Image (spheres, rainbow, N blue to C red):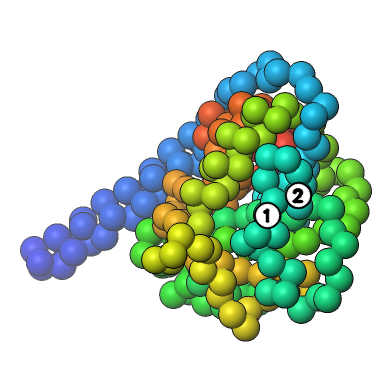
């Protein structure tokens, strides 16, 4: 084996080892930091009811469509969905990579290029909203009651996650939805291995001074603190 070939093998071995080491450290820190609680004893109040909902991978935060703190229908409009039903009580907010949201309605539609852009901070983000008439608690949907003050702080966090136009209005992404009651909007920030849709939801709970993980990239890291 000549010298140049040995150098190639040596470099390849080190590269593979570095990738394996990164994956091990990433998984270890993701697990450990998700189990470290913040806001362990939030203020007890039943003034505002919210829900934390997961589809098994992605976490949404559900809040009242309208109350004295915020009327979301001033920006998140019913007519931007496919439904004519305007009698809704909750609206869900989720943040994520725009490519994932718009180009990957099913996991089978996922492209390597989309995953790579999302993982390595190369894409853009979007906000996904969905209206609900009723919400049912189950293993993947947790009810939380909070104070008006804490909800106001959470509202500010959600508002700041939207990209605004020159008139300070949210930017609706037309002709994209998963179903009858949802819509997409341009989002702030970028998705990455270190800041995922679940990191956003976890930070949303932090902003409202509710129980959350120190840092998490997966939904179980949030729900662990509500079991």
Residue positioned 89% across, 44% down in the render: 137
Say which label, 1 or 2, has the lower sequence index: 2
Secondary element type, mark 2: loop
Which residue occupies the foreground of this view, 182 or 224? Answer: 182
Give residue 86's mark: none
Q: Position of residue 196 (x, y in %)?
A: 52, 51
Q: Position of residue 34 (x, y in %)?
A: 58, 33
**Vertical relation: 70 (above or below) 49:** below
Q: Is residue 54 visible?
A: no
Q: Position of residue 28 (x, y in %)?
A: 51, 35
Q: Outermost residue, left direction?
A: 3
Residue positioned 10% across, 66% down in the render: 4
Which residue occupies the foreground of this view, 176 or 196? Answer: 176
Secondary element type, mark 1: helix
Mark 2 Cα-neighbour bin, 10 Å: few <14, some 14–19, many ≥20? some
Check disc 1 and report the residue beneath it: 72
Residue positioned 63% across, 55% down in the render: 94
Q: Is residue 120 left or right of residue 48?
A: left
Residue positioned 70% across, 30% down in the render: 148
Which quadrant is home to the C terminus? Answer: top right
Mark 1 Cα-neighbour bin, 10 Å: few <14, some 14–19, many ≥20? some
Which quarter of the figure has residue 37? top right
Q: Is residue 96 left or right of residue 120?
A: right
Which quadrant is home to the N terminus? Answer: bottom left
Check disc 2 and report the residue beneath it: 66
**Vertical relation: 84 (above or below) 75:** below
Q: Is residue 189 left or right of residue 196?
A: left
Asked whether the beta carbons under mark 1 and mark 2 sit within 8 Å of each other, the answer is: yes
**Vertical relation: 154 (above or below) 209:** below
Q: Position of residue 22 (x, y in %)?
A: 39, 45
Q: Is residue 115 visible?
A: yes
- Cα separation between marks 1 and 2: 6 Å
């Amino acid at each position: 084996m000549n010298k140049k070939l040995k150098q190639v093998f040596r470099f390849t071995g080190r590269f593979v080892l570095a990738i394996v080491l990164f994956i091990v450290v990433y998984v270890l820190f993701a697990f450990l930091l998700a189990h470290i609680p913040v806001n362990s004893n939030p203020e007890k109040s039943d003034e505002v009811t919210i829900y934390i909902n997961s589809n098994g991978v992605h976490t949404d935060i559900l809040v009242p469509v309208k109350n004295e703190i915020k009327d979301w229908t001033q920006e998140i409009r019913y007519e931007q969905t496919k439904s004519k039903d305007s009698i809704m009580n909750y609206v869900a907010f989720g943040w994520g990579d725009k490519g994932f949201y718009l180009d990957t309605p099913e996991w089978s539609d996922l492209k390597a290029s989309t995953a790579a852009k999302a993982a390595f901070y190369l894409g853009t983000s979007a906000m996904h909203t969905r209206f609900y008439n009723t919400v049912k608690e189950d293993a993947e949907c947790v009810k939380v009651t909070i104070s008006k003050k804490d909800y106001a702080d959470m509202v500010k966090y959600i508002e700041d996650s939207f990209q605004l136009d020159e008139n300070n209005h949210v930017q609706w992404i037309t002709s994209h939805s998963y179903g009858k009651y949802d819509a997409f909007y341009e989002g702030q920030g970028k998705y990455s291995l270190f800041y995922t849709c679940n990191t956003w939801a976890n930070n949303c709970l932090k902003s409202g001074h509710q129980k959350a993980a120190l840092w998490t990239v997966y939904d179980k890291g949030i729900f662990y603190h509500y079991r």
